[in-house]
Image (cartoon, grey):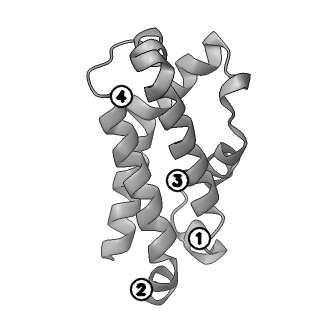
């Protein structure tokens, strides 16, 4: 497995870094409304860019590694590339906030474990 991971390290590390930045952006916010409205929506705009980066990087992870790490929802992550701020309704903003606060840190942990094996 180490051979597969070696060629995939750069995109995996990019995904983990983006997730960590997202966690830092969301730190201190308790609701999606606070997060969306913070700094004239700049924090939310930055989070959208980071989600797009995650989606883009996930396309560079080999199928072999994706199969060996099924706990990561690769099919969902690849769709992050299509997230656009203008399409984000109140419901979508809440889903994005929940994703950033609760789900992506778990994914980052799984990816970090993958790079250690």
Quickly name the residue at label 2. 2
Dot 4: element: helix
Q: Earlier in the sequence, mark 2 or mark 4?
A: 2
Distance between the alpha carbons at the discs numbered 3 and 4: 21 Å
User: Label 2 to label 3, Cα distance in Å?
Assistant: 18 Å
Q: Earlier in the sequence, mark 3 or mark 4?
A: 4
CA gap, disc 2 to disc 4? 33 Å
Task: Check disc 2 and report its element: helix, strand or loop.
Answer: helix
Which residue shows up at 39% across the image and 31% down it? 102
Q: Which residue is mark 4?
A: 26
Find disc 1 in the rendering and name its residue. Answer: 61
Q: Is the residue marked by circle 3 packed among few (<14), some (14-19), or many (20+) residues within 10 Å? A: some
| Marks 3,1: beta carbons within 8 A | no
Which tag, 3 or 1, sits closer to the chain's start? 1
Q: CA distance from mark 2 to mark 1?
A: 14 Å
Q: Quadrant of the C terminus?
A: bottom left
């Amino acid at each position: 497995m180490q051979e597969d991971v070696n060629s995939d390290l750069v995109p995996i590390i990019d995904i983990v870094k983006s997730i960590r930045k997202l966690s830092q952006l969301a730190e201190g916010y308790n609701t999606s409304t606070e997060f969306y409205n913070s700094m004239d929506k700049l924090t939310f705009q930055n989070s959208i860019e980071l989600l797009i980066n995650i989606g883009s990087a996930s396309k560079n992870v080999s199928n072999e590694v994706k199969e060996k790490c099924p706990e990561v929802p690769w099919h969902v992550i690849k769709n992050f590339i299509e997230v656009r701020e203008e399409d984000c309704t109140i419901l979508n903003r809440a889903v994005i906030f929940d994703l950033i606060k609760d789900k992506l840190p778990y994914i980052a942990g799984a990816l970090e474990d993958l790079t250690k094996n």
